[in-house]
Image: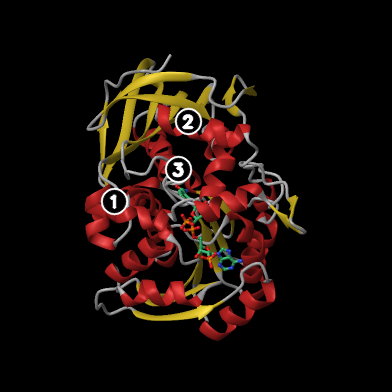
Amino acid sequence: MGKALIIGAGGVSNVVVHKCCQNSDIFEEICLASRTIEKCDAIVAKLPETKTKVSTAKVDADNTDEVISLIEKFNPDIVINVALPYQDLTIMDACLATGVHYMDTANYEPPDVPKFEYKWQWAYRERFEKAGLTALLGSGFDPGVTGVFCAYAQKHYFDEIHYIDIVDANAGDHGYPFATNFNPEINIREITANGRYFENDDWVEIPPMSMKKTYDLPQIGEKDIYLLYHEELESLSKNIKGIKRIRFWMTFSEKYLTHLKVLENVGMTSIEPIDFEGQKISPLHFLKAVLPDPASLGPRTKGKTNIGCVIQGIKDGKPKTYYVYNVCDHQEAYREVGSQAISYTTGVPAMIGAMMILKGLWKKPGVYNVEEFDPDPFMEALNENGLPWQESFDPILLD
Ligand code: NDP
């Protein structure tokens, strides 16, 4: 059916590549390109034999011209961006210059200030519309599946949605005293930022990790969850009409938070470069270099993730509640594709997003977040591609 250029060769990319190869009728040919070609070759070396034709290439995606040359050489139908959020705009520019569809799993971030805002990418809407191209933003799990879950609830179960709580729980244990499950720089930037949620048409900002609850999650049990700002809140607060409040919660252990507090107190989580022996170094970049590589956590991580949406609203004039979630087992994911559940739960929806575009089901000129498309084929594809979801109509509500 089509050709995909996949940019980035980290944990998420490894899953995307495996999953594309499991769907060879859709992904007939893929090229895996990244800054370090050896990482692409290492992923490809572990792939089982399938009908998908696979090649690798070297590209610095900070450089639009390099991406353009690669696109011209490989001639893909879509670019799947699973590099870092810093590369989103250069890759979108290259897609516009060459007439290729685009998708990613994280919003663009300026390297110096963490913002978690879509405004830079939404500003491309008209250009993609005029070019007749689709740009699909945030097709990972959160953002990604969480937005599809909300669109599905809206389509099938509610006349009006009033409250959404997205709960992201990771009960996996990798045995290290401290490590992050995905890119440490992006992860630490996310959780050291102020908490923020949307209520009554306004944003409420709170100090980092200052709102905590306990929540009993199916197949995981009772966990401490903390309110964080997460990028899908921005698009969902606009796209779910009539929403009164939307919040995002994530589990953290005491041990994790204590390590993070110490690192923060000694200045290791700052991205601001400091002078060190005649060189400028960013403490956060240095910290990333000394922490375990998230890709190395796969074989060690045991336990499950549970990510879902607790939704309250009105149907036929009556109050209604709904909970939709996925449980993913770290070791099962590792056995299947050689990555733990965090990468797995991001890589599978990234592949599905690209599949939706290639099949023409989610093809619409412009720049869109996942909840703006029909959720049904995506929900079906989750069940078929390793992320089955479950639903209940009597969830525990978060006050
Ligand atoms: P990794 O750090 O493991 O991998 C990133 C990859 O991008 C590396 O191969 C890196 O190359 C490559 N890269 C970095 N800069 C460039 C560049 N300038 N040109 C080409 N390649 C580059 O990250 P993950 O796989 O964990 O995450 C990938 C993306 O997925 C991130 O944007 C992350 O924010 C997002 N994500 C989304 C989630 C969701 O649910 N929506 C959840 C988890 C992650 P090198 O190794 O050479 O530096």
**Residue visible at 33% across and 26% down?**
322
State which quadrant residue 72 falls in.
bottom right
Q: Quadrant of the N terminus?
A: bottom left
Q: Position of residue 177 (x, y in %)?
A: 39, 40
**By what rule are the colours in the image chosen?**
secondary structure
Q: Residue at x 37, y 48 (%)?
A: 342
Q: Which is more toward the observer, 350 or 333?
A: 333
Q: Is residue 192 above or below residue 394?
A: below
Residue depicted at x 37% and y 68%: 17
**Res. 137 in view:** no
- In the rendered structure, which disc, 3 or 2, sits on the residue that comes first in sequence? 3
**Whether the residue under disc 3 has CB within 8 Å of ligand 1:** yes
Q: Position of residue 153 (x, y in %)?
A: 37, 34
The front one of 140 and 357 is 140
- Tell me the amino acid under the disc marked 1: Arg
Q: Which mark is residue 300?
A: 1
Q: Residue at x 41, y 43 (%)?
A: 148
